[in-house]
């Protein structure tokens, strides 16, 4: 009895191996057929052919399984082979580490992002006046920061809120940048403004609300200008990477990613800073990754701990907002730092124990 059982089990093992071999053989055939179809410009998946194969199998079927069981099993086998084809044909993303194992360093003139040295992007939420931006720029320069920010085209939740100064704002930002020897970054929201943006700016920002504005991404991919792409309000890391791919696939690989918090059920902070997105993006892509602590936390008291956390997990830089008088700021007055707070913030981040990088 026990001998018979052993023998049956052995036969079963052999059948399993045969099925395995046949499934793999089938996979190889499907792949070969797929290659021929692709070379002839035909689509790999053919539902009519799949239905014919299933009918043929069911006609030959004699039991003991139910017809529906056989159909189900074969559909799974078909599906596996189809996935094998898709894997093969799905392009490995240009932004992926798999495609390019070495870190991309984005050079903004003589300032490098992603070379192991932390970079800071500091400045007001919105450009309001030349005097306002100059005041911030002076302090930003004194703190050893290289990149000045300031919004000119503001994507506001309410249409009745301050919308930004537009091109005039870009001019003001450029003036301050030139006056204090700083690189400047500002958000562009409309594909037709990418060109004008690249006249005034050293880095073009694409904001969270526009992360999947594919026309904007494509335009950004065509200019010879570094791009700072922010993660969408509710975008997965995969969606973020694909948005980045839109830019890089158009030929512009000077791209910096920026985690800026995502929507969750938590209300203690404005958004939830997805801190592990930093190491995930560093692993999955070769691009520099920054963290915006202002828009992620929405809280002035959390800017410093969030920035420390960002640097500790390997961010290449930190963005935060600074305003000479946040109480009267035309946007984000809750979370911008005033100048003394900003100075303290930078002093703390320059402490040697905060990061292995030096600024
Ligand atoms: C900004 O940086 O000015 C901004 C609007 O940020 P976000 O797109 O991340 O909301
Ligand atoms: Mn802001």
Image (tube, rainbow, N blue to C red):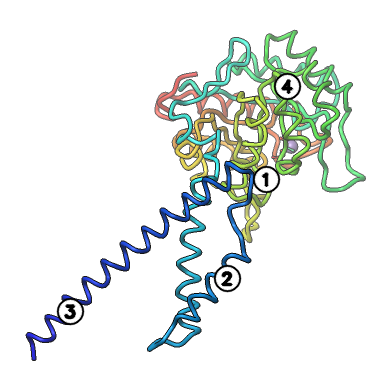
Marks 3 and 2, how far apart at CA = 35 Å
Cβ at disc 4 under 8 Å from ligand 1: no
Between 37 and 312, the residue placed more toward the observer is 37
Residue, disc 2: 52
Label 1 residue SS: loop
Between 29 and 12, the residue placed more toward the observer is 29
Point out the image quarter for the N terminus. Answer: bottom left
Residue 164: name its quadrant. Answer: top right
Which tag is nearer the camera, tag 2 or tag 4?
A: 2
Cβ at disc 2 under 8 Å from ligand 1: no
Label 4 residue SS: loop
Residue, disc 3: 9
Residue, disc 1: 232
Using the image, tell me which numbered label, if any, was put on residue 47. Answer: none
Which tag is nearer the camera, tag 3 or tag 2?
A: 2
Which residue shows up at 58% across the image and 53% down it?
A: 44
Marks 1 and 2, how far apart at CA = 44 Å
Which residue shows up at 51% across the image and 58% down it?
A: 82
Q: Which of disc 4 and disc 3 is earlier in sequence?
A: 3
Marks 1 and 4, how far apart at CA = 22 Å
Point out residue 109 in the picture as x, y percentages from the top left corner. 63, 11
Residue 259: name its quadrant. Answer: top right
158, above or below 7, in the image: above
Label 2 residue SS: helix
Point out residue 297 in the picture as x, y percentages from the top left corner. 63, 45
Q: Which of disc 4 and disc 1 is earlier in sequence?
A: 4
Which tag is nearer the camera, tag 1 or tag 4?
A: 4
Cβ at disc 1 under 8 Å from ligand 1: no
Q: Which of disc 1 and disc 3 is earlier in sequence?
A: 3
Q: Which of disc 4 and disc 2 is earlier in sequence?
A: 2
Residue, disc 4: 223
């Amino acid at each position: 009895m026990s001998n018979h059982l052993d023998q049956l089990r052995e036969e079963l093992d052999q059948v399993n191996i045969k099925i395995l071999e046949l499934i793999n053989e089938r996979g190889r055939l499907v792949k070969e057929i797929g290659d021929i179809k692709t070379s002839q410009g035909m689509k790999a998946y053919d539902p009519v052919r799949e239905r014919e194969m299933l009918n043929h199998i069911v006609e030959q079927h004699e039991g003991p399984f139910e017809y529906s069981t056989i159909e189900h099993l074969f559909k799974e086998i078909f599906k596996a082979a189809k996935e094998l084809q898709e894997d093969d044909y799905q392009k490995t993303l240009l932004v992926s580490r798999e495609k390019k194992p070495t870190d991309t360093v984005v050079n903004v003139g003589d300032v490098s992002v992603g070379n192991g040295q932390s970079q800071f992007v500091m400045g007001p939420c919105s450009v309001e006046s030349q005097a306002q931006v100059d005041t911030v720029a002076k302090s930003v320069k004194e703190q050893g920061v290289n990149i000045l920010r300031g919004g000119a085209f503001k994507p506001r939740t309410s249409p009745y809120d301050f919308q930004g100064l537009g091109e005039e704002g870009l001019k003001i930002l450029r003036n301050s940048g030139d006056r204090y020897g700083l690189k400047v970054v500002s958000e562009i929201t409309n594909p037709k403004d990418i060109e004008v943006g690249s006249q005034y700016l050293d880095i073009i920002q694409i904001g969270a609300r526009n992360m999947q504005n594919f026309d904007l991404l494509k335009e950004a991919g065509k200019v010879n200008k570094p791009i700072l792409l922010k993660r969408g309000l509710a975008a997965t890391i995969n969606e973020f990477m694909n948005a980045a791919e839109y830019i890089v696939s158009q030929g512009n690989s000077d791209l910096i990613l920026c985690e800026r918090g995502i929507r969750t059920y938590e209300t203690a902070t404005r958004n939830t800073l997805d801190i592990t997105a930093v190491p995930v993006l560093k692993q999955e892509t070769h691009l520099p990754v920054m963290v915006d602590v202002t828009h992620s936390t929405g809280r002035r008291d959390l800017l410093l701990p969030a920035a420390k956390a960002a640097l500790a997990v390997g961010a290449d830089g930190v963005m935060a907002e600074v305003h000479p008088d946040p109480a009267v700021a035309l946007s984000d007055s809750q979370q911008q730092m005033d100048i003394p707070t900003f100075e303290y913030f930078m002093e703390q981040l320059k402490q040697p124990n905060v990061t292995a990088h030096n600024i």
